[in-house]
Amino acid sequence: MLGAMPTAESKASTAQIVISCAIAFVVLNVFFYFMSTGYFDSHRSLGAGAAAGAISSYTPAQMTQVRVAFGVFTAVMAGATIIGWLRPSQVGHAIASLFGAFYLVASIPAFARGAPAVLGVAWLVSGILLLALAWQSYRKRSRASWAMLVAMCGVLAMAEVFGAPKLARAVDVTLWLAMILPGLKLVALIALTSVREDYLEGALAPA
């Protein structure tokens, strides 16, 4: 059966979410620019003589790097939000599957390079579960798998928010780039939650 053609109301809703995300992107980056300027100005080291108190603790390159990283973070989040609005089920399951594959692959060097055993086990188990649950939820329309997948996205997002500073230092990136990982899981969580009606008892009957 052919899919329903997009209605004027759905097109208007899509336009609204795109405009809202674009405005949020601009406003957040302008706000962050001025706030970061104040932060950088407040972190100055004492210099000698006439330069006393005028030496910034951050170089112009470091300031630009932080602002660009925040711009990348907000751009990724805005783009993922828009696509998630248009295709919530596909986006939610795709993000979960991609992270599942990432954790599964990352567990191999974690074991090989002598990383803490708990890290390798956590990545291995998380990867297997995310891939299995995403498959069962999307292909088999399993309500239990969908519920577990939503819970895992929420738990992992929360854990990685607190772990982002350590991850940023470990891989030598800015905090905002590290925040993309929990941010995408939050998008997956919201996208999957928005299709909860597809997993009601009445909607699970085969067509």
Image (cartoon, grey):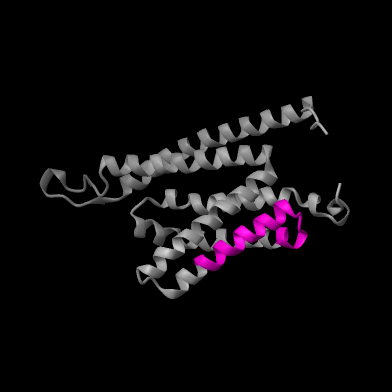
Residue 168 picture quarter: bottom left
- Looking at the picture, how far across and down is residue 89, in whole percent? 69, 46
Residue 134 picture quarter: bottom right
Asked whether, in this view, residue 158 is left or right of residue 190, the answer is left
Determine the residue positioned at 30% across, 44% down.
Answer: 62
- Looking at the picture, how far across and down is residue 61, in whole percent? 28, 40
Determine the residue positioned at 45% across, 39% down.
Answer: 71
- In depth, the one of 42 and 74 nearer the eye is 74
Determine the residue positioned at 34% across, 42% down.
Answer: 65
Residue 88 picture quarter: top right
- Looking at the picture, how far across and down is residue 138, in whole percent? 71, 51
Asked whether, in this view, residue 21 is left or right of residue 42, the answer is right
- In depth, the one of 94 and 158 nearer the eye is 94
The reply to whether residue 154 is visible in this rendering is no
Determine the residue positioned at 68% across, 37% down.
Answer: 86
Asked whether, in this view, residue 47 is left or right of residue 93, the answer is left
- Looking at the picture, how far across and down is residue 160, in whole percent? 50, 60
The residue segment tinted magenta is 123-147
